[in-house]
């Protein structure tokens, strides 16, 4: 139990800006991080709930409320995934060969493609969340977005080859595949939450969105980069979150059920 808690704290410290006790890293503990990544989504969801309550209590405008939510996601992760998204955009849109793309991805300078697509991503998220608030769809199902996105992030991480075997992300992929049984438990908990809040159909819809995009994104990563890297995984989080917010927005307009 002590080791599990230690690994969870390590994961919180790496993927969020939440202050946690310092724990010395080692490769053995690092490889267990994918198990705890969905729990990071739970932690983020709890803080997101506070933000939503604040927006409602203070009766903020839809635009200001949506801005708060966008800023919250950036703040809670320290911009980690946004940085990964920008690096991935610069590499992909360079249209070079795979080795050159991987080299560009390591460059810390922000290129034109990164700036343009960062603007598109943030504006898309802001506009979609604004519409969600206007249409009174800012419900508890929103809390599942950081959880579902990170659950599928872990699945992507453990089931896709790495573009570089010496990368930091490759350490996380060394976890024995038998531990993926934990993801079944996470899925059960997500669906159970959907039942509890009486939004099971939209919960399933969100899971399907993330699942379909997982297959599309995995194929994209293998074709364009020869596998995944930490940046590619981080970019997946950002895009999936936008798609899930979009799913919440358009769900009622789809004749699915």
Image (cartoon, rainbow, N blue to C red):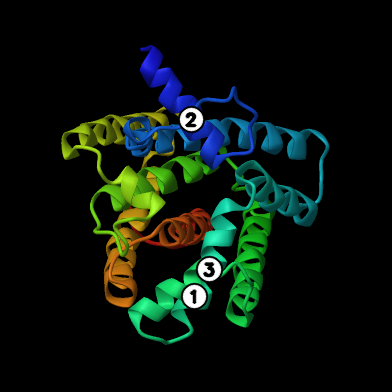
In percent of width and height, residue 39 lies at 44, 32
Query: Tags 2 and 1 in contact by the CB under 8 Å rule?
Result: no
Q: What is the CA distance from the residue labelled 2 to the residue labelled 1?
A: 29 Å
Give me the C-alpha separation between circle 3 and circle 1.
8 Å
> Looking at the rendered structure, which numbered label has been put on residue 31?
none
Direction left: furthest residue: 178
- What percent of the width, then of the height, locates residue 199? 43, 39
Q: Which of marks 3 and 2 is nearer the N terminus?
A: 2
Q: Is residue 159 above or below residue 254?
A: above
Residue depth check, mark 3 versus mark 1: number of the one nearer the observer: 1
- In the image, which disc is placed on residue 10? 2
User: What residue is rendered at 32% in x and 37% in y?
Assistant: 31
N-terminal of the two: label 2 or label 1? 2
Q: Which residue is drawn at 29% across and 57% down?
A: 165
Q: Quadrant of residue 13?
A: top right
Question: Are the residues at dot 3 and dot 1 in contact (C-beta closer than 8 Å)?
Answer: yes
Q: Is mark 3 on a helix, strand or loop?
A: helix
Q: In this view, does 247 lie above or below 7?
A: below
Residue 87, labelled with which disc? 3
- Label 1 sits on residue: 104
Instruction: Name the residue nearer the viewer: 106 or 143.
Output: 106
Q: How crowded is mark 1: few (under 14 residues within 10 Å), some or many (20 or more)?
A: many
Name the element at disc 2: helix
Front residue of 144/165: it is 165
**Horizontally, is 218 left or right of 246 in the view?**
left
Q: Within 10 Å of the Cα at label 2, are there few (<14), some (14-19), or many (20+) other Cα atoms?
A: many
Seen in the picture, residue 96 relative to 155 is either above or below; the reply is below
Check disc 1 and report its element: helix, strand or loop: helix
Left or right of residue 123, residue 65 in this image? right
In the rendered image, residue 137, in percent from the top left (x then y), is placed at: 59, 48
Question: Do the residues bearing badges 3 and 2 touch, measured as CB atoms within 8 Å?
Answer: no
Q: Whole-percent x and y of residue 112?
A: 63, 81
């Amino acid at each position: 139990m002590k080791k599990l808690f230690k690994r969870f704290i390590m994961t919180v410290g790496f993927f969020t800006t939440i202050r946690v006790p310092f724990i010395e890293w080692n490769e053995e503990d690092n490889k267990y991080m994918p198990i705890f990544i969905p729990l990071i989504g739970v932690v983020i969801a709890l803080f997101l709930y506070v933000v939503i309550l604040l927006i409602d209590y203070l009766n903020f405008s839809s635009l200001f409320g949506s801005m708060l939510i966008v800023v919250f996601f950036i703040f809670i992760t320290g911009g980690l995934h946004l940085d990964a998204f920008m690096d991935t955009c610069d590499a992909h849109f360079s249209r070079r060969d795979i080795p050159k793309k991987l080299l560009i991805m390591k460059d810390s300078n922000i290129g034109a493609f990164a700036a343009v697509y960062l603007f598109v991503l943030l504006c898309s998220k802001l506009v979609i969340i604004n519409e969600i608030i206007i249409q009174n769809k800012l419900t508890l199902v929103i809390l599942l977005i950081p959880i579902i996105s990170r659950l599928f992030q872990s699945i992507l991480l453990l089931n896709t080859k790495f573009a570089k075997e010496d990368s930091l992300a490759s350490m996380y992929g060394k976890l024995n595949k038998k531990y993926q049984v934990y993801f079944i438990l996470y899925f059960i908990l997500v669906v159970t939450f959907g039942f509890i809040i009486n939004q099971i159909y939209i919960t399933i819809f969100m899971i399907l969105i993330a699942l379909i995009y997982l297959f599309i994104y995995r194929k994209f990563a293998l074709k364009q980069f020869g596998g995944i890297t930490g940046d590619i995984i981080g970019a997946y989080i950002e895009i999936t979150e936008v798609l899930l917010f979009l799913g919440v927005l358009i769900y009622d307009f789809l004749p699915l059920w």
